[in-house]
Image: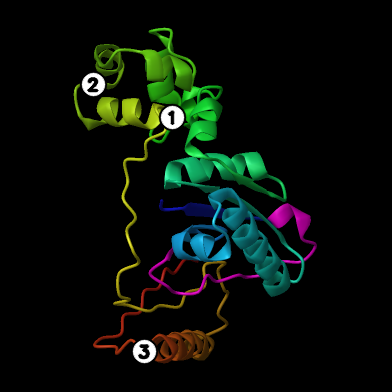
Amino acid sequence: RDRAVRLRRDLRSGRRRARLRPRRDAHVVAKSIDECFADVTAAVHAAASDDAEGARRVAEEIRAAVYRATGGCSCSVGSASNMMLAKVATKLAKPDGHVHLSDAEAVATLRTLPATELPQIGRVNAAKLEALGLRTIADVADAPLAALEEALGHGKLAKATKQRAAGLGDRDWEPRPPRRSVGAQCSWGFRCRDAAHFLDLATELLRVATERAAKLKVEARATKVAVKVWK
């Protein structure tokens, strides 16, 4: 059975800022600067015949690697049979641990959580569900589809929410597509003294982007520079 892992680096535990870039791989999909999903199915099966034990061993390897690479930052790991459940497991693993949810454990855990833990159920949709007395994931799972359609409309969301409340992930694993572009940016803002200073900054960003492209074996067909200027 496929295993998904969601990682979230706990920045609060580190006294210094560190950067951790996931290895660019079809089995790793970054979600933000401090979290990603990873398909570790093969690694789990190679580590142990039991999924829970295999997931524990792989998670410990990942957590140790993050600790070494960042100089001491902790890492929470959640593992389960799909990405949605791995996300739930990660929250349970915080601030510095690993939680593996079997399918049976995942369903039981889901039912205790508020409906807002489901994807696409934010404050607005949660209020619509609550108006019908549906506050928890258990309420959503046990409700007839017609009730969910009354709250969320007759589109895909109601059916998807019903499926998710039962612990069934509705997103297939999407491997990282081949890299087509490479960039470099600075978003903190710089005060350039003059045109020459700005040219130095742009040249440095171009150098960084060029080095990244060479490392990733991406051949550039065009170069684009975007600048936001304010006074």
Vertical side of 21 occupied by 86: above or below: above
Query: Mark 3 = which residue?
Result: 217
**Does the magenta segment cover residue 125?**
no
Residue 30 appears anywhere in the view: no
Say left or right for 229 vs 56: left
Vertical side of 153 occupied by 212: above or below: below
Vertical side of 166 occupied by 219: above or below: below
Q: Amino acid at mark 2?
A: Gly
Q: Nearer the viewer, residue 55 or 222?
A: 55
Tag 3, which secondary structure? loop
Q: Earlier in the sequence, mark 1 or mark 2?
A: 1
Tag 2, which secondary structure? loop
Query: Mark 2 = which residue?
Result: 153
Query: Mark 1 = which residue?
Result: 122
Give me the residue at 25% from left, 86% from top.
222
Residue 45, position as x, y percentages in the image? 50, 61
Residue extending farthest right: 15
Residue 1, position as x, y percentages in the image? 41, 51
At label 2, counting other C-alpha atoms closer than 10 Å, the crowd grade (few under 14, some 14-19, many 20 or more) is few
Say left or right for 129 vs 114: left
At label 3, counting other C-alpha atoms closer than 10 Å, the crowd grade (few under 14, some 14-19, many 20 or more) is few
Tag 1, which secondary structure? loop
Residue 92, position as x, y percentages in the image? 63, 39
Say left or right for 185 vs 181: right
Residue 76 appears anywhere in the view: yes
Q: Nearer the viewer, residue 145 or 106?
A: 106
Q: Amino acid at mark 1?
A: Gly
Residue 153, position as x, y percentages in the image? 23, 21
Please give the range of residues in magenta.
Answer: 11-30
Q: Earlier in the sequence, mark 1 or mark 3?
A: 1
The answer to whether the residues at label 1 and label 3 have Cβ atoms under 8 Å apart is: no
